[in-house]
Amino acid sequence: MVFDVESIRKDFPILNRKVNGKPLVYLDNAATSQTPQQVIDVIVDYYSNYNANIHRGVHALSQEATDAYENARRTIQSHFNAKHPHEIIFTSGTTHSINMVANGFASLLKKGDEIIVSALEHHSNIVPWQMLCEKTGATLKVIPMSSEGELIISEYDKLLNENTKLVFVNHISNALGTINPIENIIDKAHNVGAAVLIDGAQACPHLKPDVQKLNVDFYVCSAHKICGPTGIGMLYGKEEWLQKLPPYQGGGEMIAEVSFDKTTYADLPHKFEAGTPNVCGGIAFGAAIDYMNTIGFGTIAQYEDELLEYATNELLQIQELKIYGTSANKTSVISFNVGNIHPYDLGTLLDKMGIAVRTGHHCAQPIMDFYKIPGTVRASFMFYNTKEEIDLFISALKKSIMMLS
Ligand SMILES: *Cc1c(COP(=O)(O)O)cnc(C)c1O
């Protein structure tokens, strides 16, 4: 299939809007992606035709909603190549998924145990582990990074030992775009008997992970970064791990039998899905994955690499512009600063010209501390962006720099 970006763009109504009188150029995809009409239609259809509570009702609407929700789970299972549908737990997103695992490990860890995270983590992948360490007396170790924004694997090797119980690394850094060598990280952790959780929030928009091939213990992501709605995401866990971890929340849906003496928990995945879930969100998450797969991840990666290379070359023509995260192995995220200009000022002027970028620490303050900067401007691309948009961004950026120097 030939990739026709103009016809793809027609799927995204929001890309037609104007911001401050200028056509919107949306380059904040690493924060959230836009939603195609195909997914919006699924949401409208759900609330127009079969909105109901699931799993409990004998009536038609409840059964239709249950079928659609469980079909979405199977879509996600097959996309990630999980062995069983019940290894896919619906959550409210990456943050929720990580907290679920961290909470589960609270009963399995003890003083002297060690948890390894990486210097490239999002706050949502640091704070839950700090809380877990406080609760259990385990210690947190950090894989350091290089100035290119790559993890230093020889240092990781030194951190691993028989006390290592868990390793948590993101697949792709949201702040710098670095693709981490997770296969290697996972294998080495398993050699010392540690479990591995991979934060795939930033990877899933750009590639298709195979959890069985990776042999990863837990893999998590959010639907809103892959053309789905906010408030829904998933936790993949190997069956044996999900059996071992205690439930996260108590409530309806997650029980087998309840009496005041004893409650037994429901089977997977319901053990981890207490209460009425985000039914519509789950169904739309499945639709978003279907949508991305119709374009195809090979096509997406190839096109986004072109955008990344084009934008990087154009940006490097600008005097005093410095890009943070220069690994050869990266996706379409560019973090940069220009001279002493504060990133916030650049972001504000760009917005006046219709360009949406992110400024700040990108929920990754340790990375900013490493570079000794308060933050960066971050432009991140999806398959629906164009070279023309990059040209508009570059010319608006040059104008902003002139106004600020
Ligand atoms: C966005 C992101 C998160 C947090 O995702 P939420 O949807 O806010 O829970 C975590 N890690 C990475 C790498 C991200 O890009």
Image (cartoon, grey):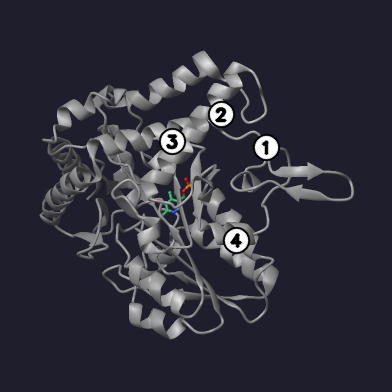
CA gap between label 1 and label 4 equals 20 Å
Q: How many marks?
A: 4
Residue 113 located left or right of residue 238: right
Can you identify the residue that label 4 sits on? 102
Q: x and y percent of residue 93 in the render?
A: 50, 45
Residue type indicated by callout 3:
Phe
Up-down: is 393 above or below 308? above
User: Which is more N-terminal, label 4 or label 2?
Assistant: 2
Residue type indicated by callout 1:
Gly
Q: x and y percent of residue 265 in the render?
A: 72, 49
Can you identify the residue that label 2 sits on? 66
Query: Callout 1 environment at 10 Å: few (<14), some (14 to 19), or many (20+)?
Result: few
CA gap between label 3 and label 2 equals 15 Å
Q: x and y percent of residue 290 in the render?
A: 34, 35
Up-down: is 315 above or below 19? below
Residue 284 located left or right of residue 309: right
Residue 34 located left or right of residue 309: right
Please identify, in this view, whether the residue under mark 3 or under mark 2 is nearer the observer: 2
CA gap between label 2 and label 1 equals 14 Å
Up-down: is 75 above or below 359? above
The numbered mark at residue 275 is 1
User: Which is more N-terminal, label 1 or label 2?
Assistant: 2
Residue type indicated by callout 4:
Ala
| Secondary element at image label 4 | helix
User: Which is more N-terminal, label 4 or label 1?
Assistant: 4
